[in-house]
Image: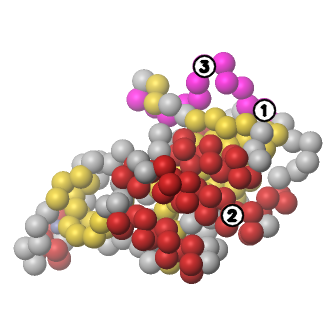
């Protein structure tokens, strides 16, 4: 486990919340969407069901962002807009909006199978966006949001999340990627999975 810019105290507290609520699990998991086998599983709604945890995780993330100095990249006179492409990102976005004093908060519902903005929502070059989500897995959801935001003329200043499973990713298209927690997960095809060979019990899980 590794963090980006959180203090060790913040990291420890965040991991403690994720572990104690079962939002973070170690074992042998098969994900429905990929069919691959993993040694770690995250389900952040299990942590966010307790309002105190939701506050702690989101406020800690927000404080880390503020401390990093990245907020100076948001220009005065522009609109500081938070966008979340995931459902679990909604409470994170609102907590972060409160702590970081955002002007707008938008989320992207799934409409006809695709994450997009609500009808009549308008973004423009006036908006400077922070994308926030619960967990970055492959990064596809964030990339989709990024493309949709950019197509409106708005700019993206920061991409953040509670967890990033991609240890090696630090930026996307020149935009800083700054999660609270980073974790590298083992990933295997069922044919080559060492956990299968060891006979470790397999748990099938759904990706939200
Ligand atoms: Zn396996």
> Element under label 2?
helix
Cα distance, mark 3 to mark 1? 15 Å
Q: Is residue 199 above or below residue 133?
A: below
Q: Earlier in the sequence, mark 3 or mark 1?
A: 3
Q: In front: 86, or 58? A: 58
Quadrant location of the C terminus?
top left
Q: Nearer the viewer, mark 3 or mark 2?
A: 2
Q: Earlier in the sequence, mark 1 or mark 2?
A: 2
Could one spot residue 175 in this view of the protein?
yes
Q: What residue does disc 2 label? A: 63
Question: Residue at 55% across / 60% down in the picture?
Answer: 56
Q: Is residue 120 magenta?
A: yes
> Element under label 1?
loop
Question: Residue at 75% across / 44% down in the picture?
Answer: 102
Q: Is residue 104 magenta?
A: no
Cα distance, mark 3 to mark 2? 32 Å
Give coordinates of residue 118: x percent, y percent. Answer: 58, 24
As drawn, the label of residue 119 is 3
Give coordinates of residue 132: x percent, y percent. Answer: 60, 50
Q: Are marks 3 and 1 in contact (CB under 8 Å)?
A: no
Q: Are marks 3 and 2 in contact (CB under 8 Å)?
A: no
Q: What residue does disc 1 label? A: 124
Q: Which residues are magenta?
A: 113-125
Farthest residue to the bottom: give it: 8
């Amino acid at each position: 486990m590794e963090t980006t810019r959180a203090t060790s105290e913040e990291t420890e507290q965040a991991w403690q919340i994720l572990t104690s609520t079962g939002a973070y699990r170690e074992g042998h998991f098969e994900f429905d969407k990929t069919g691959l086998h993993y040694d770690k599983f995250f389900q952040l709604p299990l942590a966010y069901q307790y309002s105190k945890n939701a506050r702690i995780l989101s406020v800690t993330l927000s404080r880390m962002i503020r401390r990093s100095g990245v907020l100076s990249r948001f220009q005065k006179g522009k609109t500081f807009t938070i966008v979340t492409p995931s459902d679990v990102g909604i409470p994170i976005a609102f907590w972060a909006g409160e702590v970081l004093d955002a002007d707008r908060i938008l989320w992207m519902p799934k409409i006809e199978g695709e994450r997009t903005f609500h009808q009549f929502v308008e973004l423009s070059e006036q908006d400077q966006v922070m994308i926030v989500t619960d967990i970055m897995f492959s990064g596809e959801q964030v990339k989709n949001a990024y493309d949709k935001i950019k197509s409106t003329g708005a700019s993206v200043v920061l991409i953040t999340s509670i967890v990033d499973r991609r240890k090696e990713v630090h930026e996307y298209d020149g935009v800083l990627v700054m999660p609270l927690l980073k974790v590298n997960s083992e990933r295997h095809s069922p044919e080559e999975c060492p956990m299968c060979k060891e006979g470790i019990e397999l748990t099938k899980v759904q990706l939200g």
